[in-house]
Image: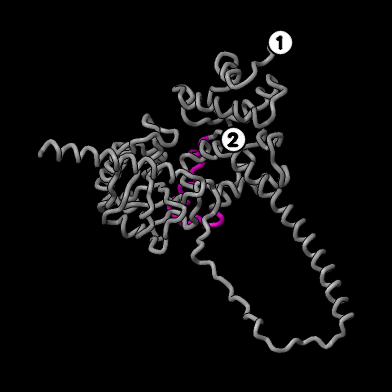
Amino acid sequence: ETKVYNAQKMVLKEVKGLVAGYNCSKLLEPKSLELIVKLDVTRPFGLRFLKPKIKVGNKGSNGTEGLWFDVSDGQAKDIFGIATRKGALLTTMKHGKDSACDILRLRDKNIIVKKAKDLHKKSGKEDDKWVICTVYLSKDANLAQLDKSKLVRETITCRDGTVYRDRSKRKLGKRPASRRNSSKRKFDSSEGQEKESITKKQKIDKKSITKKQKNETSQSVNYTAYQHFVNKMKEVVEYEFKTQMIPRASINSTMWDSHKKEFGNQCDIHCKCVSKLGLLTKNVIPVLLKKNNGNTTQDRNLLDRDSMVGFTSNFCGKFYERILNQFPNDTPSQILERLLKMWKKHTTQRRFGITCKDNCPCGGSWSDLWLPICESVGVKAHRK
């Protein structure tokens, strides 16, 4: 009986892991909700974690991009309410001014929580007891009981960077009353006058439809350009603002405003916006601070410019023209692809580090380090 019980227990654990893996894959869809919440390390989280049994996402040795959890009790229940009933995924966590860390195992979470507890116990400061977490919820999650006071940013975004719209709050207009039972028709005109009015109405309707179609076409083109821009800048945003817990929707919106001023409202693979990435990201933090009046602790931390990574402002500026000279047939999008691969190498080199400042020595390693990496992306450069 003991062997049967243990076998049933192992099967149940395996099944739960498979279910968790499937649910994780669903929560990594573009329209999943992205919440940035703060948790008190001095109180029980009330989270039950499950390790997925299938490969999901592209991070970690097991392929997962976070930890699947459900809410049992404690502060998590007070914060999320019934929002986690269709699934929840913890992906990153940070404490204080530290960089956000990917949560791929329970050990990753426990290290940050222990550090926060020790620091709070030593300092006694209120700000030291909070950890900031990125949580993904189902796109159909019920947010009616969500405690918005625990959100770092009130604006809730989707994983693709768009702003979440709560469908349950949309008001449906009243349907017009039926006229089937109307016993009288109010037509005092003759049959000829009636035909003439119908003809005029058809002409007016045709003009209005044509105008509406033109507006819809224009909006569709602009939206397509914006979506192309967001997709192209996805990794750029991830690298440059990795240490900042700023909603992607805010970053994308501000960068797009800068793009429209400098390059117009169109963007494709030939758009030269890649040549001025520093200009596109320059106003992200100032606009956010102006919007929030710099009231929160995180807003004050954003003023620390040394916390910026420097990928767009320094690294790309150093190498864009060099790549263009070496690969003259490249489109700006292809140059960006080479820059992104170079940056991954930059972050793994101890002499350069995970940031790129004005005094970073990476600029002097073009021939022996960066050029071979560029050549590994596409067609080799023509050496003179």
- Inter-mark Cα distance, 1 to 2: 30 Å
Question: What residue sits right under mark 1 in the picture?
Answer: 384
Segment colored magenta: 289-309
**Res 232 quadrant in image:** top right
Query: Residue visible at 38% across and 57% down?
Result: 83
Q: Is residue 294 magenta?
A: yes
Q: What type of secondary structure mainly makes up the magenta span?
A: helix
- The local crowd at label 1, few if under 14, some if 14 to 19, many if 20 or more residues have their Cα within 10 Å, is few
Numbered tag placed on residue 313 in the rendering? 2
Is residue 304 or residue 41 the one in the foreground?
41
Q: Position of residue 11 (x, y in %)?
A: 24, 38
Query: Residue visible at 42% across and 33% down?
Result: 59
Q: Position of residue 143 (x, y in %)?
A: 42, 60
- Amino acid type at mark 1: Lys
In front: label 1 or label 2? 1
N-terminal of the two: label 1 or label 2?
A: 2
Q: Position of residue 273 (x, y in %)?
A: 68, 37
Quadrant placement of the N terminus: top left
* Residue 111 drawn above or below residue 76: above
Numbered tag placed on residue 236 in the rendering? none
